[in-house]
Image (tube, helix red, strand yellow):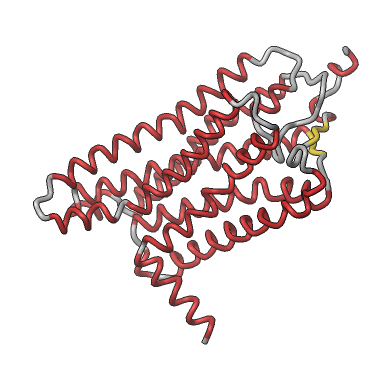
Amino acid sequence: MSSFQNFTSSSIIFLLTGIPGLEAFHTWISIPFCILYATALSGNSLILFIIVTQPSLHEPMYYFLSMLSTTDLGLSISTLVTMLGIFWFNTREISFNACLSQMFFIKLFTVMESSVLLAMAFDRFVAISNPLRYATILTYYRIAQIGVAIVIRGTLMLTPMVALLKRLSFCNSHVLHHSYCFHPDVMKLSCTDTRINSAFGLTAMISTVGVDSVLILLSYVLIIRTVLSIASPEERRKAFSTCISHIGAVAIFYIPLISLSFVHRFGKGAPPYVHTMIANTYLLIPPVMNPIIYSVKTKQIRRAVIKILHSKET
């Protein structure tokens, strides 16, 4: 056992896992995952292209949407190589440092997405409650500051959490239970005390995603109060309709995240493939669905998409 503990972290090789019990069908399972990745990458790239090339969309709401698409692209790319590598080539090995890097970027883009959704909730609150000062409150400079703060916040909170894993020893199995490096998964393989890691990981997620969810909820309480104070039913409907896309984005981000947490905590008796499938889809649902939601529910984006598709046909 001591011989295992003497391994340096750089020499550790972890083994990723596809869909437990369904290894014989990995090639077929890869087809829907390929479609999801293609949809996520093309959809978010299209949203970014539209916002950059359409001057009419150079407004705070769409700048925040471009941030959301950027984080969705990053989240998709973070898992694409390992997940499809397992399904196509059964490439399961990943070095310790590569595992930490992947884990950091998955967590970073998750926290950034949560922060962007909070910024978008603030944008909708200002637009509805104080429309006359909207342009002066959310200036280009302030939006840039918010974007930089989102990156810095995620980096400062997550760097220590990932770096603390380097102090652990791994003397038993090196088989991970997901198609990517998942922080609790790596900690479970350690034969040393992980209480500090668990506490810091929980603190980091509560102080980012947890706090963001509370503030988003508070924003919508204030938005609803403002909307209900509007005398005209038509104006109330129009004001609240501007929030529909954002509510959808919040739902598809937090519902899979909460589902994954519940399954890991209370689903001990569930088949292993249930945990893996939920963990995989949790990272893919927001990048796939966000471009669809905003293309369908946001008139300006929908018009721009139709315009681009028509220009390609001609």
Relative height, residue 195 to residue 109 (above, below):
above
The quadrant in which residue 280 appears is: top right
Q: Nearer the viewer, residue 269 or 152?
A: 269
Report the side of 256 relative to 11 (left or right): left
Question: Is residue 87 rendered to the left or right of residue 249?
Answer: right
**Residue 202 drawn above or below residue 84:** above
Above or below, 165 relative to 309: above
| Rendering coords of residue 112 (x, y %) | 49, 41
Q: Which residue is outermost to the left?
A: 231
At horizontal 57% and vertical 42% (from top left) the residue drawn is 282
Residue 71 in the image: x percent, y percent? 53, 49
Q: Is residue 75 above or below residue 12?
A: below
Left or right side of 222 for 39: right
Q: Position of residue 303 (x, y in %)?
A: 39, 72
Q: Is residue 237 left or right of residue 32?
A: left
Residue 192 in the image, given as x and y percentages of width and height: 73, 13
> Residue most toward the bottom?
314
User: Image point 69% across, 23% down: which residue?
Assistant: 187
Foreground of the two, 123 or 222: 222
Q: Residue at x 9, y 51 (%)?
A: 231
